[in-house]
Amino acid sequence: MSDRGELKIYPDAQAVAAATADLFIDVGRQAIAQRGAFRVALSGGSTPRAAYELLAQPPRKTAIDWSAVHVYFGDERCVPPDDPESNFRMAHEAFLDAVPLPKENVNRIRGEADPGHAANEYASLLRTELGQPPHFDLVLLGLGPDGHTASLFPGSAPDTDDNAMVRAVYAKSQDMWRVTVTPKVINAAAVVAFVVEGDAKSEILEKVYAGPVDVKEYPAQIVRPQSGRLLWIVDRRAAELIHS
């Protein structure tokens, strides 16, 4: 185990999806048993989608009290909720609409609003519902090929406006505004899990997990929960350079 987290390597992408879905259920059931509610921040992208789809199917669909699950998002593209690029739309199609989750328990970032206003609005929501700083039971993250996570992109300090909790970010590579939680929110979580699969991610995973620390170059390296657990759920192809 590295001080950068616990690396869990699975045979393939399907096993990564199953492990991620099981983590969701396990952390959720424990949180509900202890505090009566499970508060989770979802990630966008194709890798977590496979895990979300498993949550909508037996046996996981009935393995948790969905009425006690409260869903949030780690970041969002500044697009309407029905846009194909929307993280909310992806999660909604993958599992939110298929499980008995009360609609009022889904807290989306309003990507259709002015980016700065949407960020301030979501920060206020998180502070009100999860404390100061907000404390999630689980934060799911992806890893971009450039070392970004959530919408924390290379080129500037990822903890810019950290105390704001949520900020608007212009992603030059995508010519798009996005809204993201800051590292302060991520690192206050009880469990943080990166979900990474495929040989296309092997080089960046090796740099972020095992290479020198440079958080401006690889913002994902700033993720180190203060008192929580950090997991890397990856497949063999993604981890091949770490164990070569």
Image (cartoon, rainbow, N blue to C red):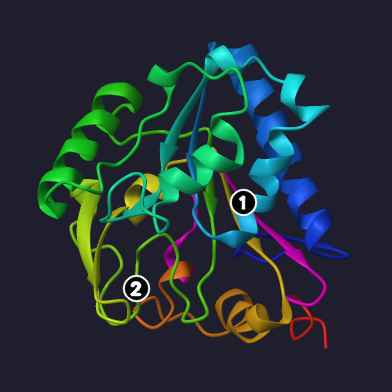
The range drawn in magenta is: 221-238
Question: Where 221 sits versus 212, above or below?
Answer: above
Give yes or no for residue 64 being in the magenta stretch: no
At a point 75% along the width and 76% down the height, the residue shown is 239
Q: Which image quadrant for residue 157?
A: bottom left
- Counting from the top left corner in percent of width and height, residue 146 is at 46, 81
At a point 42% along the width and 27% down the height, the residue shown is 106
Residue 41 shows up from this direction: yes
- Counting from the top left corner in percent of width and height, residue 223 is at 47, 60
Neighbour tally class for label 1: few under 14, some 14-19, many 20 plus, Cα within 10 Å:
many
Question: Where 227 sits versus 241, above or below?
Answer: above
Q: Nearer the viewer, residue 55 or 216?
A: 55
Q: Is residue 79 left or right of residue 148?
A: left
Which residue is disc 1 drawn over?
49
- Local secondary structure at mark 2: loop
Question: Where 62 sits versus 240, above or below?
Answer: above
Q: Is residue 198 left or right of residue 176?
A: right
At a point 66% along the width and 36% down the height, the residue shown is 24
In the image, which is nearer the foreground, mark 1 or mark 2?
Answer: 1
Q: Earlier in the sequence, mark 1 or mark 2?
A: 1
Give yes or no for residue 227 being in the magenta stretch: yes
Q: Is residue 23 left or right of residue 126?
A: right
At a point 42% along the width and 65% down the height, the residue shown is 222
Give the amino acid at mark 2. Answer: Phe
User: Which label number is shown at residue 153?
Assistant: 2
Q: Nearer the viewer, residue 181 or 190?
A: 181
